[in-house]
Image (tube, helix red, strand yellow):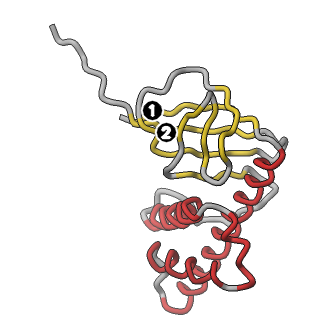
Amino acid sequence: MLDVLNVRIYTNKEQGIALAKSFGCSRFVWNYYLSKTNNQYQETGKGLSYCDMAKELTQLKKLPDYKWLQEVTAATLQQTLKNLESAFKNFFSKRARFPKFKSKHKKQSIRYPESCSIKNGGLKLPKLGIVKASISKSINGKIKSVTVSQTNTDSRHSVSLTVRVSKLGLNTD
């Protein structure tokens, strides 16, 4: 069973800059591959799959003009590609609208699918280190993913921790 815990985090200056870079890189990857998928669909009638996008992203990061994509953790960029593929699947299944381009003037978010933990009363995130967090309850389970969000109105960051907890046993006596 999955449980979600929302937490406020308090970044220092370096961590705030690193998060801003991560938001920007994730937004760029989303917009770049949304445009590329749209173009390919218009030309061939078939879009790009996650595997195609992930292979191309690896090559894109090696190009001199896109070296800055290496500054952030690869897992968040790959998660962005998975989210884009999911958005297209939901659109074609008529469960959602067509995916839109992301803007830096709206809510920003990135998801860390792994390698996150609670350390010293803070949240340990890849390439950020330990970030101060106000965790209101104990976490009994394994952290599956961490989504960091920032609204456009302020520079505060919030986190949604998705935790796998063991099933609660119901006493049927």
Horizontal side, residue 155 vs residue 4: left or right: right
Above or below 54: residue 119: above
Pointer 2 with pointer 1, Cβ within 8 A: yes
Instruction: State the residue position of label 1.
Output: 3
Image coords of residue 116 (percent x, y): 54, 44
Q: Nearer the viewer, residue 103 or 132?
A: 132
Residue located 60% across and 85% down the image: 39
Q: Residue furthest bottom?
A: 43
Kindly identify the amino acid type of the residue bearing the numbered disc 1: Asp
Q: Quadrant of the N terminus?
A: top left
Image coords of residue 140 (percent x, y): 43, 26
Q: Secondary structure at mark 1?
A: strand
Residue 166 position by quadrant: top left
Q: Quadrant of the C terminus?
A: top left
Instruction: State the residue position of label 2.
Output: 162
Residue located 54% across and 82% down the image: 56
Above or below 40: residue 133: above
Above or below 80: residue 111: above
Q: Secondary structure at mark 2?
A: strand
